Image (cartoon, rainbow, N blue to C red):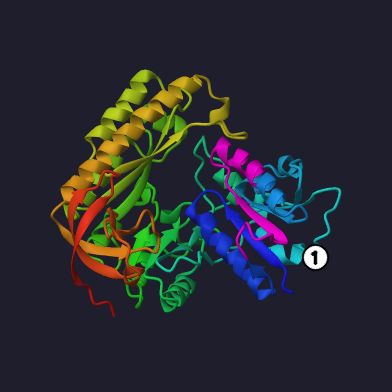
Amino acid sequence: MDKKVAFYTLGCKLNYSESSAIGRLFTQAGYQTVAFTETPDIFVINTCSVTENADKKCKKIVKEALKISPEGYVVIVGCYAQLKPAEIAEIPGVDMVLGAAEKFQIVEHITDLTKQPKTLIYNQPVSEAKEFVTSYSFGDRTRTFLKVQDGCDYSCTFCTIPLARGNSRSDNIESVLKQAADIAASGVREIVLTGVNLGDFGLQNGERVNKFIDLVKALDEVEGIDRIRISSIEPNLLTDEIIEFVATSKRFVPHFHIPLQSGSDKILSLMRRRYKRALYADRVAKIKQLMPDCCIGVDVIVGFPGETREDFIDTYNFLNGLDISYLHVFTYSERENTLAAEMSGSVPGSTRAERSKMLHILSDKKRRSFYESQLGQTGQVLFEGDIKEGYMHGFTRNYVKVKAKYDPVLVNELRTVTLTAIAPDGDVEITEGEEILVH
């Protein structure tokens, strides 16, 4: 009987694409992929280390895995595994830890599933993670996360990602187009482009071979994919050329997620971000000028060292005045081996929590305002296979979440709908119109 392997993925979309790629390696080696609860022989836990909470989650998942399968072989990969392999090795039940350069050789490393007294660690310096490994998520018929870039050459003072993933490196355009064609052939309708610093696409072996706009233009010609979404792009790398192309694109949708992190130039400088807030405001204005209905999401960090009440209010007012659609709010947490962790002016935890709550409320207001601006409009919705209390969900091209009574015929289908009202749960209710014919 085939050995069984199960995956649990924490963190970003990039991790999900890589878990799927690792899963395909196991399949090729004759393993059977099963759900986490189906007593697998091997558990692979793909970790994140962006927040302190992600580290704690890893420990909890290991504990749960061993409840399900006490003799299960537990392998930890991902950013936490690269940054703190010795710490992970101390977690009871962990059998193997693989760093950034080793995780895609996981099948070769697992030669014996006998649990040993000491955890095996394969973890080279992150500088050895030089190769780009193509990955895309698999299993969701509606959308796929396609990794096109990895690593980061930036040095933001709060971030451990360069320490966990290494220098910026990219796939080549020909390879990306092949992956996109394979994804299209599988019946998936939407691709989400992912990377650590997506806008920096084009670096290979430390040399710039292409620019992100080159990839965007090439992907726009791929047949069989209805939508392509850009997951996140730094404001200083989001050029006029990219915005202008997306505005008239066949496949790229009017939705940008643009990290801000702070609306205070003082804090941006302490963070070593590569822009000031005036540039960010300019990017939002440019997008809205060309795509008035475009959805714009924003990452923001509260409680960074040195953030005074005045700095936070400055950020709040800046965000409140921007024509944006929602926020992803992160409460700053100290990370080892970062410059920010050594900075003075630590913000009390209670103050961080209070500021986070204020921005979450602002995000709810921004999302509702954006949804209200879309009511009465007609748009395309790509429906997903989820069922919740008799309803299914889908998203418009500009990322309005809609709900409709469940109909299995609608799964992974595009429909023309009229956005009619906002439901009590915050989703948008619809009136279905004519079906869109998709070639």
Q: Is residue 370 left or right of residue 215?
A: left
Decide whether residue 57 is among the magenta residues.
yes
Q: Element at badge 1?
A: loop
Q: Residue at x 25, y 33 (%)?
A: 320
Instruction: Please tell me whether residue 288 is drawn above or below residue 206 in the rendered image.
Output: above
Residue 88 x/y as whole percent: 71, 43
Type of amino acid under label 1? Thr
Residue 141 x/y as whole percent: 43, 69
The residue sitting at the left extreme is 376
Screen quadrant of the C terminus: bottom left
Q: Residue at x 24, y 59 (%)?
A: 244
Q: What is the number of callouts on the image?
A: 1
Q: Residue at x 58, y 60 (%)?
A: 19
The residue at which mark 1 appears reads as 111
Residue 268 x/y as whole percent: 40, 33
Instruction: Please tell me whether residue 100 is drawn above or below residue 227 in the rendered image.
Output: above
The residue sitting at the right extreme is 117
* Residue closer to the observer: 125 or 106: 106
* Residue closer to the observer: 121 or 66: 66
- Using the rendered view, name the quadrant where residue 370 is placed: top left
Decide whether residue 21 is among the magenta residues.
no
Screen quadrant of the N terminus: bottom right
Q: Residue at x 52, y 50 (%)?
A: 152
Q: Is residue 70 left or right of residue 225?
A: right
Magenta-tinted stretch = 34-61
Residue 343 x/y as whole percent: 54, 24
Q: Callout 1 environment at 10 Å: few (<14), some (14 to 19), or many (20+)?
A: few
